[in-house]
Image (tube, grey):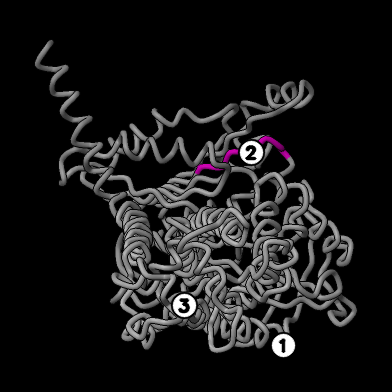
Amino acid sequence: MKERICQQQERKTVVMGCWMLNESVSVILAVSWLGVNLYLFIDTFRWYGEEESFFYTRVILGSTLAWARASAVCLNFNCMLILLPISRNLISFIRGASICCRGPWRRHLDKNLKFHKLVAYGIAINATIHIAAHLCNLERYHLSQSAEAEGLLAALSKLGDTPNESYINPIRTSHSNTTTELLSTIAGITGLLISLALILIMTSSTEFIRQISYELFWYTHHVFIIFFISLSIHGAGRIVRGQTPESLLLHNVTFCRDHYAEWQAAAQCPVPQFSGKEPSAWKWVLGPVVLYACERIIRFWRFQQEVVITKVVSHPSGVLELRMKKRNFKMAPGQYVLLQCPSISSLEWHPFTLTSAPQEDSFSVHIRTAGDWTRALRKAFEAEGQTIKEPRSLPRLAVDGPFGAALTDVFHYPVSVCIAAGIGVTPFAALLKSIWYKCCESQTQLKLSKVYFYWICRDPSAFEWFADLLLSLETRMSEQGKTHLLSYHIFLTSWDENQAIHIALHWDENTDVITGLKQKTFYGRPNWNNEFRQIAYNHPGSSIGVFSCGPKALSKTLQRMCRVYSSADPRGVHFYYNKESF
C-alpha cells in the first residue's frame, strides 16, 4: 500500500513536471520581459547614482534623480512593446512563417492580449514611480531656493542669475508656484497629458467597464495617439540637467565641490555649465509606431474593399447570421475577422469568428446580441430569415482579416477535443464544416483521426441554428462510413418544468427531442474527470489537442484536466491546451 502511494505521488510529480515543461514558453517570455525591465532599471539607477556629470544634480535631488530616470527608461521600453501584440497582421505573418514559429511558440501567439496587458501593467507601475519621483524632485528644487538653503546647495540654485551662466535649478525663485512653473513647461504639459491618457485607458480597460460599455473602452483606447505624441516630445523641455562634457574637462568636481565660494574667481574652478539630455523616448517608440501605422493603413485599405452581403438570417436566442463575399478572401477553420459598420460607428471594429468552411464560396459570421453595437447592427439589418434580394439596400460592412487563432492547429493533432460554451460554439462551426468537406475528398489524407465535440448551453433554443449543421454532418459521415471520426456531446444546463415534462414524454424516440439528432442531449454539466479519463483510455500514446471557447472558469478547469491526465511517460498520452482568444 505504501509503495502504491509513493508511485502515485511520483506520477503526480512527473506529470506536473511535464506540464511545467509545456508551459515553459510562457514562463520564458514572462521572465525575459521581467528580466529586461529589472536590468534596465538597475543599470540606469546605478549610472545616474554614480555618473560624475550628474553629481551636482544629485546634490539638489538626491536619489530621486535615479528613481525618475530608471523608471523613465523602463517606461520607454514598455511603450516600445505595447503596440506589437495588437498588430494583428504582424502576428498573422509570424504565425504563417512556420519555419520561425513552431510548436509551443506558435500556440503562444494566441496569448498576445495577455502580453499586451502585462506590458500595460509595466507601463502603469513605471509611470507611477516616475511621477512620484518627479514630484519629489520639484519639491526639492523649490526648497533649494528657500532662505534656509545654504552651502553648495544654495550656490548651485543661484547659478544662472548672471550672464554666461547656465542654470541647474529650473525653479528660479523661492516665491515661484511649483504647479504654475510645471505647467508652463513642455515636460509639465506633456506629462499631464500622458498621465490623464494613461488613467483613461487603464480605467476603461477593466472587465467591468468592457462588459457595461464596450464602446467606451474602444473610444478611450484611441487616446493612445495623444499618449504617444506627448511621450515623444516629453523630454524636449530638458528640465533635469547635468554638467556638460566641456565643463567637466575644466571643472574638476572632486576638487571644486569643496571650493564653491571661489568658482567665480579661481581659474582652476570655473563656473560649471549645465545642459539637459536630448529626448530619447521617440527613438524607442518610432519603430513600433511606424509598424502600427502600417497596420492601420492595411486596415483602411481593407475597409475600402467591397463586401457583398448575400444572406441575413435571424436565429433564436438573439443570434444574427451574416453571409458575405469579398474578393480574394482566403480563410482557415477557426479564424476570425474584424467587422465595422460605418452607419453605426466609423471607428469601432469588433471581432467575430468565421462560421463557414474554407471550401464554401462565401464566408459567414454568427453574432449574438450582447451590447450596444450588436443591438444596433441587428436593428440595422432587420433580419427576417430570408435570402436578401437587394444587397444595396443593406448597411455597408467593412471586413478586416482573417486572422489566425488557436483552432487552426486542430488538424495538427491525431486526436482533438473541442469544447464550447454558449455562443462560443461559433469557432467550431467552421471546423466541423471543414471536416465535413475533407471527408468528402477521397484524396485527402488527414492526420486528424478523431474529434470529440462538447457543447454546453443553458438555452434550448440556442441549439436550433447549430443542430442543422450537426445533422448534416451526422448524415454525411454515415453515408461515407466515417461515423467513428466525430463524437459529439451536447449538454443542456437549464430547463423549466414544461420542458422537463416534454423531454420525459419523448425520451424513447429515435431522435433527440431538442436537437433532432440521433445522439441524445445530456442534462446538467459534464463530469470532466470522467470524460478526460475515458479519452485518455481510448487513445494511449497519443498527442491530444484540447481547444475551448468559453468563460474563464471553464478554461481553468480544462487546463487543470490537461495537467492531471497527461501521462508521466513521454510515450504516453499528452493533452495540450489551447484557448480561443481575440
Identity, as a three-letter code, of the amino acid under mark 3: Trp
Q: Mark 2 or mark 3, which is nearer the start of the sequence?
A: 3
Residue 457: mark: 2
Position of 363 with respect to 450 (left or right) is: right
- Is residue 32 on the magenta stretch? no
Residue situated furthest top in the rendering:
1
Q: Position of residue 430 (x, y in %)?
A: 55, 62
Q: Which stretch appears magenta?
A: 454-460
- Residue 234 in the image: above or below residue 301: above
Q: Give the mark toward the camera: 1 or 2.
A: 1
Q: Residue at x 44, y 75 (%)?
A: 242
Residues at marks 1 and 2, CA–CA distance in whole angstroms: 38 Å
Identity, as a three-letter code, of the amino acid under mark 1: Gln
Residues at marks 1 and 3, CA–CA distance in whole angstroms: 32 Å
Label 2 near label 1: C-beta < 8 Å?
no
Instruction: Give whichever of 186, 80 is nearer the camera.
Output: 186
Q: Position of residue 496 (x, y in %)?
A: 76, 24
- Which residue is disc 1 drawn over? 304
Instruction: Give whichever of 394, 57 is nearer the camera.
Output: 57
Q: Residues within 10 Å of mark 2 (few under 14, many from 20)?
A: many
Instruction: Give whichever of 554, 537 is nearer the camera.
Output: 554
- Which residue is disc 3 drawn over? 284
Position of 521 with respect to 277 (left or right) is: right
